[in-house]
Image (spheres, grey):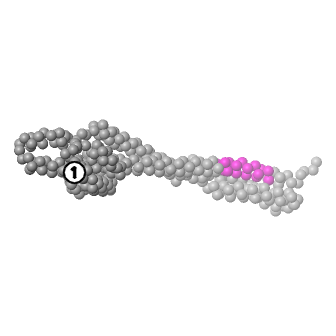
Amino acid sequence: MSTDPSWLYSTIAQSSAAIVAIIGGFITATVLSLMAEKRSLQNQSADKEKQLEQYIEQENDISRNYEEMKVEIFLDDNIDELLEQDELPSLEQLMINHPGQKLDNDILNNKYKELSKDKLEAKRFIEQKSNMITPENSLNDFDKWFKNNRLDISNFNYEILRKEYERQYEVKKEILEEEKRKSHNNLFDLFNICNSQDWIYSLKPPVYSAYEATKNDNALEYMKRKLQELRQHIAFIKTEIDALGSRLKTFSYPPNLKWGIATLGYLAFFGIIIPVIIIGNELYDSDPLKWLTMVSFLVGIILVFFYVSFLIWTLRRK
């Protein structure tokens, strides 16, 4: 019975192919799994970054609205004091009169400029229409006045315009009363003037809406609570982003992966390619090729063994 002269090379080639396939498949699967894990971490980090941007944008919007509302409430609370004067005081003087206010300077400056502009426009409008203000014929009723005269006040600040009307009304009423005192100059007429309905109405204190105050307070509390919630979310997301960043920084592929690929390449070349070439060319009787193939195969097996052992040792140290 004759022996197949290619059995040695065939065995070496098959054995090398099996080793390369097993270890190479393991390394490939491990690398692909780690790549998928890294991609997942990167996607999670990107999603958290987008979420953080949205939360920060919301926080900025609500924070600005919150600061604007604080300024508006502050100005509304002091609007009577401000509008009683012919000219608005300087912002510096206003803050001296009301110390301890924690308001955004930029927003306060802008709102105060708007208030000054609205007051100037209202003052000019009322002065232009002053000939329509007749204290002797009507009470100090701003709504009736502009409706009866069919005036369009949609472009003006209603409250400021009303105050300017009342100021002009009071000025004209005082002038009218002074003229009456001079013309009649008797106690009876003076008594009638002092007890007239106009005078009683002018002494009525302004009506403050408790509902509006409560509504503003509730709105401020809501925005303050919303800001606190958003800032907690932002802090939590930043913590998550930092954790993902730390994991990405410490992320690594199997140690000495290049050495493993080089070992498998060596075994594939000397354990598969060379034997296949020898079998294909029927160089079975060449002793140098035979020894080269066997020694190379043994060296390849030793290299694979040492690489796997070193890989396990390295991973156990981590």
Mark 1 neighbour density, 10 Å: few (under 14) some (14–19) many (20 or more): some
Left or right of 256, for residue 156: left
Magenta highlight range: 13-30
Determine the residue positioned at 82% across, 62% down: 288
Viewer-closest of 90 and 261: 90
Measuring from the top left, give residue 302's x and y in whole percent.
Answer: 70, 54
Q: Residue lying at the far left in this picture: please name it.
A: 186
Left or right of 269, for residue 142: left
Determine the residue positioned at 24% across, 49% down: 133
Determine the residue positioned at 81% across, 51% down: 11
Q: Is residue 20 magenta?
A: yes
| Residue with the mark numbered 1 | 168
Q: Is residue 59 magenta?
A: no
Viewer-closest of 259 and 63: 63
Q: Identity of the amino acid at label 1?
A: Gln
Measuring from the top left, give residue 90's x and y in whole percent.
Answer: 23, 57
Magenta residues, dominant SS class: helix
Measuring from the top left, give residue 181's x and y in whole percent.
Answer: 9, 48
Q: In this orientation, does residue 76 appear?
A: no
Measuring from the top left, give residue 222's x and y in whole percent.
Answer: 36, 40
Determine the residue positioned at 70% across, 49% down: 25
Viewer-closest of 207 and 128: 128
Left or right of 150, for residue 272: right
Q: In this orientation, does residue 53 appear?
A: yes
Q: Secondary structure at mark 1?
A: helix
